[in-house]
Amino acid sequence: MFKAYSMGLVIAAAALLPSWAYASGGHHHGGDIAVSAVNGKLTVGGDHFERHGLTGFNIYEANFGDLSGGPWVTKDPGFQTQQGNKLTPGALIGFQGHGVLNFWNGTSWGVAAAGLGVSIADVSQDALTTWTSTGVSAGEAQYVSQVSDGGTIHDHLKMSITPNAAVGAYMIELNLNSAAYASSDSFYIVFNRGLSNAAFEDSVGALITTAVPEPSSYGLMFAGLLCVGALVKRRRKTSL
């Protein structure tokens, strides 16, 4: 259960930050997940993301060990308001996890090994939501931010992985929600755990190139199967 006083402390602390941290178009982190609302629905964008070839959902990149929190922690990407966009002041923006923890072993994606987990600590209570090979264990609170009086957000949540996790890339799926808006589409965060930059980009590239056939392609494929079936049937008749 969300505790109002906890969010009050978060807001009070945010008020101590310089105004540029929340100004639309001000301090902008290119790799952050940019949040906006379109026609009453939360959307995610930003300056740096890829698109999953199968689902079309956004893919954001992260790197464990990029901060002083240690080799198993990161706070990037953060969540900030899309430049030029305003959200409803006071609205609570939350997140929800989906699916299982996925792992790239250097050649292919699959479900991560048992006993491993990637967690996100929510902004209000540091409650952990954890992705594992069996699903998502939701934390007591799952809040990303509360919209400021100026209509903006900018928060970086602590994300961590089980210590000594195998070298590779790890992927989680989540979306954003709010009582003030319809929920966003899902998106992915892919974490680098000890790979070289080139090897990590290979893991992301494998997700991008998993393409869905266009409707016209299905038609051509079906027509091709019909032709093959007709040819086989004709050859059978000829051989009788």
Image (cartoon, rainbow, N blue to C red):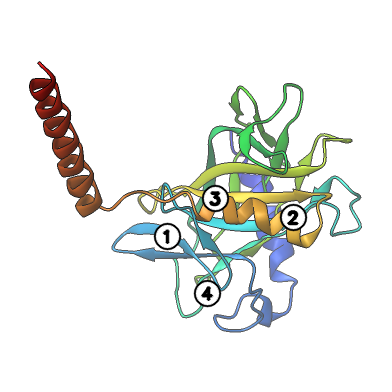
The residue lying at 9 percent from left, 28 percent from top is 234
Seen from the viewer's position, the closer of residues 128 and 188 is 188
Query: The disc labelled 2 sits on which kind of residue?
Result: Ala
Label 1 and label 4: CA atoms lie apart by 19 Å
Asked which secondary structure carries label 3, the reply is helix
Asked which secondary structure carries label 4, the reply is loop
Labelled disc at residue 207: 3
Q: Which residue is mark 4?
A: 150
Mark closest to the chain's N terminus, 4 or 2: 4
Q: Which residue is mark 2?
A: 199
Q: Position of residue 137 (x, y in %)?
A: 62, 27
Label 3 and label 1: CA atoms lie apart by 21 Å
Q: Nearer the viewer, mark 3 or mark 4?
A: 3
The residue lying at 45 percent from left, 72 percent from top is 86
Label 4 and label 2: CA atoms lie apart by 41 Å
Labelled disc at residue 43: 1
